[in-house]
Amino acid sequence: MTEMTDAPDATGTARPTRRAASFGAHALGLLQVTHPLPSALYVLAVAIFSLLAAGAHHTSPDASELARALVGVACAQIAIGSLNDYRDRAADALHQPNKPIARGVIASWEALALVTLATLANIGLMATLGPFAFALGLLIEGLGVAYDLWFKGTPVSGLLYAIYFPLIPLLAWALFGNWQPFLLWLLPIGALLGVAMNIANSLPDLEGDLASGARGLPHLLGLRRGLYAAWAAPVGVVILIWTLHLSRLAPAHLPALLVATAAGLLSVALAILLYLRKPLPVTLKVTFYVQALGVITLAGAWLAAVAL
């Protein structure tokens, strides 16, 4: 069994102290520090968008290029997640002692080693995919690193999410598709969904973040207004894509557009119902993934509706 104590650092802040952990606990901690479920969702999104981009180009994605892109995105997410836990290790020891570094199953240097190795792998893989994809791949990780080191807990964090989300489908189109006018609409659509996910991701830990001095967009909004914003943004995207369709600015195939609409509205409705039934932080963690899957389906179905 692993034990963890809070030892004060030079500033008097509690920091985790690591003691010997079993091999299984150590391996699990290394996995957990990478935030595997959110990372997997990003990789899934890139895979879906890549297939759609290639389909719009009436071809299939090159298997080797797709594999390198997916592994590169996974490495970027591993680096971002591990750096996040390294950066927050002292606050986590006080407010989230279940985190791997905070509970002492991995050392802080191991998280940094993961950041370094994953970043080098991402650079190496993206460098083989062409200059535009290389730039987008580095920008995706760079925004996450900037969030972790400087802007988490500030109002700028929402802006980073708003920039970050449209880059995911744009990376897929840079690799496997051609430029098409509807891609411009990914900017407002992705920005709305990105801000919604920033808020939804922060709400489960809102109290602990506030105690640590965080003052990002979710913290400024508070729980009630944050919930309203996270639920309203996908509904706003649904209204936007129907406006684009009816105005012929981005005409869409009706069946796929209906799937996008259903995904956005049903995921929000399910999130609301789950939270009203049990308004607890653990429920907010579940509803984040519900909405994240809804967002991926909404974006993917809309891209299919306008591209195929």
Image (spheres, helix red, strand yellow):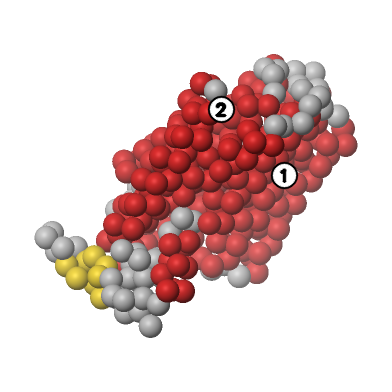
Residue at 62 percent of width and 40 percent of height: 67
Amino acid type, label 1: Thr
Report which quarter residue 186 is drawn in.
top right
The residue sitting at 54% across, 67% down in the picture is: 282
Visible residue check, residue 173: yes
Residue positioned 58% across, 36% down in the render: 69
Q: Is residue 154 visible?
A: no
In this rendering, position of residue 194 left or right of residue 252: left
Crowding near pointer 2: few (<14 within 10 Å), some, many (20+)? some
In terms of sequence position, does the residue under pointer 2 or pointer 1 come before the other? 2
Residue that badge 1 annotates: 297
- The residue type indicated by label 2 comes to Leu
Looking at the rendering, in which quadrant would you find the C terminus? top right
The quarter of the displayed image where residue 100 is located: bottom left
Marks 2 and 1 in Cβ contact (< 8 Å): no
Secondary structure type for disc 2: helix
Residue plotted at (53% across, 28% down): 128
Q: Quadrant of the N terminus?
A: bottom left
Q: Is residue 86 above or below residue 60?
A: below
Give the percent coordinates (x, y) of residue 94.
30, 67
Say left or right for 135 vs 234.
left
Could you say where residue 64 lies in the image, as x and y percent from the top left? Answer: 65, 36
Q: Secondary structure at mark 1?
A: helix
Q: From the image, tell me which residue sits under label 2.
A: 129
Disc 2 from disc 1: Cα separation: 26 Å
The spot of residue 191 in percent (x, y) is 56, 33
Query: In the rendered image, which quarter is residue 27 located in?
Result: bottom left
